[in-house]
Image: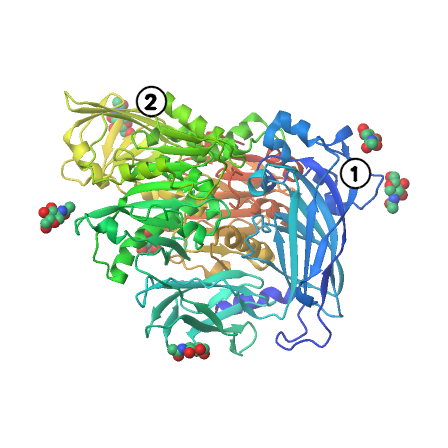
Amino acid sequence: MLISLLSNWFHLLPMITQQPFNPSPSPASISFSETWHLLGPFQIGTREATWGADPLEQIGGFRSLSYNESDSYRSSLAVNGTVGWSTLTAESSSSAGNPGNAKAELLVRFDNTDWQSLQSVYGWAALQYQGWARGKITVGGNQQRTVVFYTDQVLEFWIDDEHQFGGDFYGYRRAPLVLHLGPGNHQIDIRITRDVRAMGGVGEPTVRIGLEAEISEGGLKLVEGTVLLPDMVDGRLVSSLGSVNLRNEEHHWIDVLSLEAVNVSFTLAMKENPPFRLAPGQSRPLSFDVALAYDAAAEVVFEITYKVEHSTEVIRTSQVRQAVHSREAEEPQKVTYLHPGGIVSYAILRPPSAKALRYACPNASLAVVIGLHGAGVETDSDLVRQTFKDAPDLKAWVLFPSGVTTWSGDDWHRWGSADTEAAIAAIPEWIKTVGWNGPNADINRRLVTGHSNGGQGVWYALTHTPDNIVGATPVSGYSSIQAYVPYSFWYEADPGVNAILQSALADYRHELLLPNGCGIPIHQQHGSLDDNVPPFHSRRLSQIQSQIDCPSEYVELPGKGHWFQGVMTTQTLLEFYAKVLGDRPAPASLSSSFDIVVANPGTMGSKGGIIVDQLTTPGRPGRIKAEHDVKQSIWHLKTSNIHRLHFSAAAARDWTRSKLVVDGKKLELLRDVPLSGQWLVHRPNESWEVSCDSLWRNRQRHGRQLGALDAMLDTSGRYMLLTSSETLSLAVQVSRNFFQYFGADAEVIGPDQLNPTEGGNRVIMSLGSAGLMPATAGRHDTIFVDEKKGLCVRGSNGRLAVYAFTEGLGAIFLRPGTNGSLELVIWAFDLLGLRFAARMVPMLTGVGQPDFIVVGQECAWKGAAGVVALGHLDNSWNVAESSAIL
Ligand SMILES: *[C@@H]1O[C@H](CO)[C@@H](O)[C@H](O)[C@H]1NC(C)=O
Ligand SMILES: *[C@@H]1O[C@H](CO)[C@@H](O)[C@H](O)[C@H]1NC(C)=O
Ligand SMILES: *[C@@H]1O[C@H](CO)[C@@H](O)[C@H](O)[C@H]1NC(C)=O
Ligand SMILES: *[C@@H]1O[C@H](CO)[C@@H](O)[C@H](O)[C@H]1NC(C)=O
Ligand SMILES: *[C@@H]1O[C@H](CO)[C@@H](O)[C@H](O)[C@H]1NC(C)=O
Ligand SMILES: *[C@@H]1O[C@H](CO)[C@@H](O)[C@H](O)[C@H]1NC(C)=O
């Protein structure tokens, strides 16, 4: 029944003539041109490219220009204010004499700019730029070929008339593009986007772009080297989940039917009920359960069966083998678990050593040391496993979450910290699985450590889950993405637009959230010669901490750089670990006064047992000042911009014993209702009251629905991507970007295939002036399409802003989904608008997309400065007039 709907989708595409599995008669060959034409550089701001902001778009786009030595274009970066074309020779090679594979490396540099002088004024922001490169890809022979195309360090490109946004900015190679190219030449236009965080800020500002094209024989590709399996200890798998990446290299849909172990050493079973579907060109991770049937097997061998749409033939993939590693019980070992996004992830776990246990009671619970890796670091590596080699006997469980990807998806924020939580929850599972009879893990007592991007992740954990943290050691960490590379080169926008972008990022502005970490021991370490993350970051945070009267230990290592062997086990760090992990302290009592700053209640855990559920005005931080009058046994809470809060059960002792005064009003907690069932609510008439109405969550925005557009990364279950035939290729692009950048799984389905109880957050794409698909839960009359008028946005005061249908008009916004989930609606009047809107789907950090954005043609060249409307939505899903521009 599913198949009948979807089988009609592809009649518009040229049908492939060859049989995918018959090697074709004419030799398959592919190559890149050696000569490329370059145009640039033009200015661009940190992470601005997502918004468009390409100056050439104002004159029809790079694709409309042709090479001409005598043409010049205005550029603020170049000498004389103009740039012209230049040529670049690619370093290309066919790999290992295989004519079906071509590689090209482009080393882009622009000499028509005085980088030093710009940098001396604008810093690293001046070493970021954009430009374009044009070359060719040539398919030999006389027939159409399927080509798998990798684009390292590229965000955006065109192949002939096809636009692609997403690419592979960090060179993950997880989700290449699958193309169908006819014989002959094809034009490739590559947008060059230089980014200091990804490419460095030292030396000449070059960009090294890597392209690879490989001719495919079609079919379902079981991607080698992507099999994820747990380690084995004492002949037992330490966990029971695995996964493998699949890629559909057909023109048609593929249904995966089964996953089968080739011999009987292991039993394997797909997690999802078959069929597991892949759209044409789509990549997805397939999760499975794995168990050992006989011990002592050193490898898993399996194959997959599938069917291609329109065919009844059941095809087997070739066999894949993956070694299973045996570890000693005390060694760091790979544990797999389910990430809330419905995918299998892994962490490296080091149980406490025998020596560490010698003096521990068997019924004790040891804290967890969490090690967050830096950008581009693979967790399953010696580098990570050996991090605490010089601290073999820490009285703790040591856990290195992977964050799913080497950049932990979103810098250890929503997607990455969800992975950390899932990894922590896997420790009790591990204890059961391996039959460990030593001390337990106290998973709510955490010492967070991390290096570089992971050091920044420590600040995030510290400021967002303070009640679970017993100590924090950010090493060589940056203070926030806003401070890493200044945002000064963005296209000049209305200050109100900038305010909204910055407020969408406020939850990651650790400098603002530092009061949350007060009272927790912090030890910062930074090399004085660090030129990757300058020590300024740690010095600045240390200074702010002393100003707000919660000092941290700060050690600056003279003459040391960003990283060195033993960076996480210097003498002072070892002493700090020992101090924090010492014998279990008496149960902590609340300090008699503390502050809370909440930028987004959706990501903020409890502090002092207080959990903020909602702010009054979204987009502005809320604050609480808590003071205990011990003599009179009264807790005074002074709040600002807080709408609703409650107390954690863990802190019941503190909050039920004392009287409570909130903003001057005495409140009585109810004795006969559990703390988790009562809320303190700030009414519009300025008075606070205690409410037991738990149904508020059915009507109002709450939990993981809160935050800006990147709240989408907080999903419980894989993404569902609802699309129609017209928007299918863009939907596959969105799913590819989710997979490439987060390792996330997005299933592409037709609008009538939605099972309301299945999956996590949804992406809904629709095109044209007919109305939007109604929201599955709650209201959907804030942003809607009126066939006669245009796109309508209702402000909280009832005013309706109407945007008439015009070329390039599009919108992307959040709506409530069922059961606390989210829907991300991507709508546009035409395909041009849909391409603009779709590029706003969260992918890179630091972009700053608020809850709703209405895009228009001007975004292409002005970026965010060209938006039609944007802003935040309040607790009732209305436009928050005070944090929006309509
Ligand atoms: C290049 O531009 C110049 C000046 O606009 C024009 O005269 C010339 O014909 C162009 N050359 C080509 C090959 O288009
Ligand atoms: C300098 O800029 C002017 C336009 O302002 C342009 O006509 C001229 O060709 C440029 N000179 C060079 C050397 O690029
Ligand atoms: C499993 O299959 C592989 C490949 O067919 C073979 O080498 C291996 O010996 C088999 N193991 C067992 C336990 O049957
Ligand atoms: C551990 O067990 C001992 C003896 O059975 C008991 O006295 C002690 O209270 C226990 N400690 C904890 C933390 O449960
Ligand atoms: C505030 O409004 C609530 C209803 O929303 C009402 O019960 C309460 O009496 C009001 N308080 C004051 C001081 O007006
Ligand atoms: C709603 O979510 C809760 C908790 O996340 C879950 O237990 C429940 O099964 C969900 N209900 C539906 C209908 O999906």
Of 857 and 61, nearer the camera is 61
Q: Residue at (47%, 48%) from the top-left corner?
A: 409
- What residue is shown with label 1? 84
* Disc ID at residue 549: 2
Of the numbered discs 2 and 1, the one sitting upstream in the chain is 1
Residue 225 vertical placement versus 713 (above, below): below
Of 722 and 358, nearer the camera is 358
Q: Residue at (21%, 34%) from the top-left corner?
A: 588
- Near mark 2 (Cα within 10 A), the count class, few <14, some 14-19 or many ≥20, is few
Instruction: Kindly report the distance in space between the C-alpha atoms of the residues bearing marks 2 and 1.
Output: 55 Å
Residue 471 vertical placement versus 746 (above, below): above
**Is residue 830 visible to us here?**
no
For mark 2, give the secondary structure.
Answer: loop
| Image location (x, y in percent) of residue 286 | 45, 64
CB at disc 1 and ligand 2 closer than 8 Å: yes
For mark 1, give the secondary structure.
Answer: loop
| Image location (x, y in percent) of residue 805 | 62, 42
Q: Nearer the viewer, mark 2 or mark 1?
A: 2
